[in-house]
Amino acid sequence: MAESRQTADAKVLELRVHGVNNTTPYDLLDLPPDAVRLVAGDKLGSFWEPTPDAAAAIAAARPGQRGAAPPGVRREAYSWGGMVRTVPNVGGLSIGGVVAGVVARVLYAIVLPFSIGNAVMWSRSLSTPDNPSGPREKLTAGAARLFGLLLTLLFTTTAVTIAIDVVALQCGSTPARCGPLEGALEGLQGLTAGQRLALLSLVPVLAVILLAVFAAVSRTRYDVLPGMELNTEETGLPRSATADRVGASEAGRGFAPKSVLSQPGFWVNRVTTDLSRTHIAAAILLVATFVAGQAASGPWQAFYGWTLGISAGLLGAAVVLACVVPTMTISVDPADVERGFVERSWARVPSLLALGAAGAMLLVTLAPLAFAPEWAIGAAGRSSAELTPLVIIAVGGFLALTGAWWRKDADRRTAAWRGCAPAVFMTVALTVSVATSAIVVVTTADWLNGAQGPAALIGQQASAPAPPVDEACGCIEQLEPSIRISGIWVVLGTVIVLAVIVALLIIVPGVFRTRVDDRRARAWGAPITPDDLPAPTGGILPPSRAVLFSRILGARTRAARAHLAEPIVGVLAIVLGAALVLSLALLVWAAVAAVLTTYDPYAPAISGLSPILTNTLNVGMWVLAVSGVAIVGALAAGGTGDGARPLGTVWDIACFLPRTGHPFGPPCYAERAVPEIAGHLNHWLAREDRRAVLAAHSMGAVLSVAALGLLASSERTRPALSRVSLLTFGVQLRPFFGRMLPELLGPDVLGTQPALAPRLFARDPWLADFEAQTARHEGPATSTAPQSTVRESIAGRFARPQRPTGAVTGTLVRADHDGAPLPLPGLRWVSLWRLTDYLGYPAMSTAPGGADGSWTNDLDRIVDELDTSGYLVKVGTHGAYYRTSGYVDAITQLARKSRS
């Protein structure tokens, strides 16, 4: 990597890493767009620095002036937003490019449940070097992979419903039914029903293959960095002199950290090929089972009876294989990483056999239908996929219920949703998948049905118009019969819509009741009256302190409401889970009633419902159809913009985790971003006289902590950590990731205090956690740094001393030697936050210390809530922490040479 001329004069690197919303490099460096230049990287991940003129202006800036940097500090920015927020450019603004962009955005919307389902694998109790895999971990890993397969099968069933049930069996026989596609479907009239069935059954197969290709192609964009050399005994390279320091020598040579993120093989978790083949095979076998079941009523009944049984049996074998295929490769042996986990996977041969058997069964099933012109199936026949969604959803719901016991936390209060994170993630993923399927089926069928209205899709049109009269003959025209869809999708979609309404009725009063209590503000020295504000110096007139304080209080209230994400998702999960159970019970009851009434095993399940429920479903049909049109419109509109993915913030969080539970979601951007950050630091620290401050915002802090774990995983790079300091601001490490993924970023890993959940109906969501923290009397065990009892006041009412910093003291950088912790020296940590930040929290504790002074929070620092560095005075929220005096103080202090 080429170095600029500024490098030789600087001994400290300040590397800024942005968070969610893909902050641009120039905004991250707080410079104009033309004042930055590329150091290294590409459009996905890149490092930027100020231009020489901008660097000179920064060096000449006065302390407190916007953009000022301490002497001897080189400032760079790392941009990673292109890895997760953008869809690849596949054609620019041409018609083809816009269409391709819309298709790509639709695919990203479809795979959203897959990403949520992938998080299930990481939210359960994980095996660690100190706690190897036991029966619980192996069982829950298999169940998580099974749940991911169910999501794929539900997607396949949706495609089967559209392609086979609607197009092949209904539109194909009478193209006039599907008005918008009548011309395109006229060619199907020359085919027999069997040939139409064989042809259209390829659509679900191609859809699943498209997902697999989409996932593989997107993954190759990130799989560009070679693995880090880990086995130093074979290289013969000289060790760094830093490793000979007390503590670093032993921790670097013989005693590796015990955190999951500090294991050599964590970021080479790219062993989803076998699982991907298994998913494709299962989807193909499901289609073959559908087709065989549909054809079993034809002239070759015996043949397709055997085909149905064999396909179903092989599908069961594929399900078992998905449960046992290895996908998580956390190893403490560097040699395992050097050899490569993919080569050691025993599932390669079984997955290839499963894929081959699936293809053979599909060919055997379709061949008689395609090449027997006399083959005939009743055009009004119903697809055998009628009840398959119920089976898939029932099994998925059962797994979600068991997810409440997938964790073994000693204190469930300090884990997300009281230790039920796997259950919550599965419920949300399953519900989103079901709702997506219902919307797709209803919207597509309603579009094909023309002007008859959504209610006609289930034969329940409340006010059917009178048939038109042909003026030429004076007779009544015969209307084409409408397309019918299974009432299963209608019931599921409608009940989910009602559940969302019920959840909102519970959530909204709690959210709008939330008011900020001033106890935390008083404890941290934040302003609690207008007089506590410092005299603002920005702007063209002296602003009113009362008005500014009222705006600060408003921002604090909005931030407190935004902090209720965990209880809000918890309420949604409970209500949506209950809705799925109610839907399944309603459908089973209606189906039984319909069969008992008509004695027809293929009778529509909707026919057994009461008039009140039927009218409710009529309304639900319209809601689903309108929702589908709105979603398609939003996705299409985004296809002509900057290529940003829908729900970008969701992708930022969900795609941090390697794909081990579901192979078809978007790739894990951290598999590239984390090694890039670690590699850039390692390159800078190759000279012994250099140090680095890793300054990370929001989600960037998660990447930065993971990069520190990667450096700690190797004997060659571990000693360099003694010259790295960490500065985080606006982070979610403690209340989000520490509670949802405790084995990765929990209190034991980072050395932070355990967190209680925010309260939905409390005046201050964090008051219970604050009181629990101030009631602790465990001594200053959370920090190895000297303690200080002087609290900093952002209002300037007290002198601001140079406070001692905190440190990362958990298993991320800690090794065990004869039962005693052996931390690496010098990994100092400061974290900034403010009460007006709607997405940022303290990293150590919500309290500045114990009520009796038994412990002090030397890691978190509260900073100014007013930004007076610009033309106008603004209330600071989640961004621009680098404009505060607290940020400048922290950089200045961390840039100093650490004490050995």
Image (cartoon, rainbow, N blue to C red):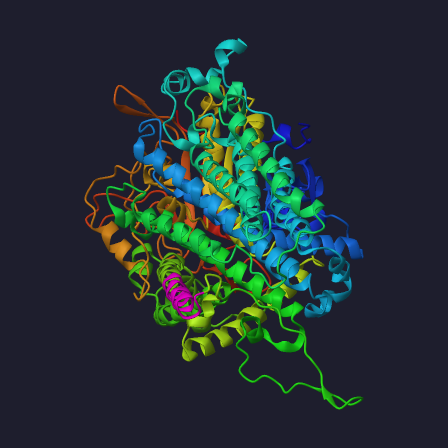
Q: Tell me which corner region of the image, top left, top right, bottom left or bottom right, holds residue 45.
A: top right
Residue toward you, 424 or 205:
205
Residue toward you, 365 or 889:
365
* Image location of residue 265, percent across then percent down: 47, 26
First to last magenta residue range: 583-599
- Magenta stretch, main secondary structure, is helix
Does residue 891 appear in this view?
no
* Image location of residue 482, percent across then percent down: 62, 72
* Image location of residue 868, percent across then percent down: 53, 60
User: Residue at left 41%, top 23%?
Assistant: 332
Residue toward you, 153 or 786:
153
User: Residue at left 36%, top 39%?
Assistant: 140
Q: Tell me which corner region of the image, top left, top right, bottom left or bottom right, holds residue 393.
A: bottom left
> Where 196 falls versus 893 (above or below)?
below
Taking the image as shown, residue 49 lies to the left or right of residue 574, namely right
* Image location of residue 874, percent across then percent down: 52, 64
Taking the image as shown, residue 478 lies to the left or right of residue 506, namely right
Does 597 lie within the magenta span?
yes
